Image (cartoon, helix red, strand yellow):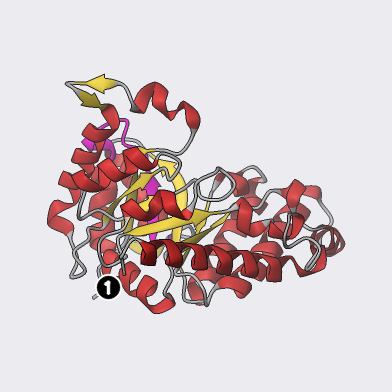
Amino acid sequence: MTLHFADRLCAAVAQKGSPVVVGLDPRLDALPEPVLAAARRAVATPLAAAAEALWQFNRAIIDAVHDLVPAVKPQLAFYERYGLAGLEAFVRTVRYARQAGLLVIADAKRNDIGTTAEAYADAFLGEAAVLGGVCPSDFAADALTVNPYLGSEGVLPFVRRAQHYGKGVFVLVRTSNPSAAELQDLPVDGCPLYEHVGRLVAAWGEALRGACGYSLVGAVVGATYPRQAARLRELMPHTLFLLPGYGAQGATAADVVACFDARGQGALVNAARSLLFAYRAAPYAQRYGAAAYAQAARAATQRMIDDLQRALAAAGKG
């Protein structure tokens, strides 16, 4: 029997002593030149070289941080843009990360209804029915981000698959981007729309809690809006939060503290650019440089962990 997703996640966070999730969002124009040059030598076509560079970069990052963090979050768009070769880089990345003992959150923001939603859920959370049998999906991860715009019909097929296979879903509730307010903050019956979505997410996951007290139905909540995030924590006490926006988008450790419970649990803090491309910026550029990009990523990850631990300790959490 597969262990409940929230229990697996909470155990991994406790083991690593870290709630940090590394976003594997490799931008080709930001990759170190040695990685690009090696990829060009290895394969002939431009798309294949691009995909090879993504894979080699990701592998080095995973090797550098796997003992520090509980999970990674590859954003599928950075791979899809390079076609079939890019998707192969995504598959290799997911498999390698899981072999390294990391949980993988596929950031694909899928949404649809009925059999289409079920097909998406099979692709990222389960198995595919094939000619009278079943086989694991090439894209299968430990959790998937889901867009709730179509309501329960667009979310519950993912929840059912997650429950069956011991996986998780993270539903978009209040995102980190500036224009989110155009829709998510609209007043509906006396409170912003994102609060209604938060209540739905809490209800969808209420009966699906693990021994740790948290549900397999989580929420994506932007760290760039700490007041709204704190309100959502009040409304969703048993919901795991996935918090984007730390680092390059401007959120700090102090901004996310309210999203953790009194034990310092219940939230994951995601960062991508500030970790992956730390070798390009101070204080890491002079010390590491392009040839040591993975070591720079590790140093930036450790610094993020330390900042979060200090902020939680100052708040009396943990």
Q: Report the front residue among 85 and 225.
A: 225
Which residue: 54% across, 48% down?
76
- On the question of residue 219 being in view, the answer is yes
Q: Is residue 292 left or right of residue 81?
A: right
Three-letter code for the amino acid on which mark 1 is drawn: Thr
Q: Is residue 107 left or right of residue 229?
A: right
Kindly indicate the quadrant of the structure image that contains residue 263. Answer: bottom left
Dot 1 falls on a residue whose secondary structure is: loop
In the depicted structure, whether residue 159 falls above or below residue 298: above
Is 247 contained in the magenta span? Answer: no
Dividing the image into 4 quarters, which one contains the N terminus? bottom left
Q: Which residues are magenta?
A: 140-155
Is 149 contained in the magenta span? Answer: yes
Kindly indicate the quadrant of the structure image that contains residue 176. Answer: top left
In the rendering, at what x and y percent does residue 109 appear? 43, 42
Q: Which residue is mark 1?
A: 2
- On the question of residue 120 being in view, the answer is no
Which residue: 31% across, 21% down?
186
Q: Report the front residue among 29 and 40.
A: 29
Label 1 CA crowd tier, 10 Å (few <14, some 14–19, many 20+): few
Q: Report the front residue among 314 and 214.
A: 314
In the rendering, at what x and y percent does residue 163 appear? 23, 59
**Among all residues in the image, which is located at the extreme front?**
314
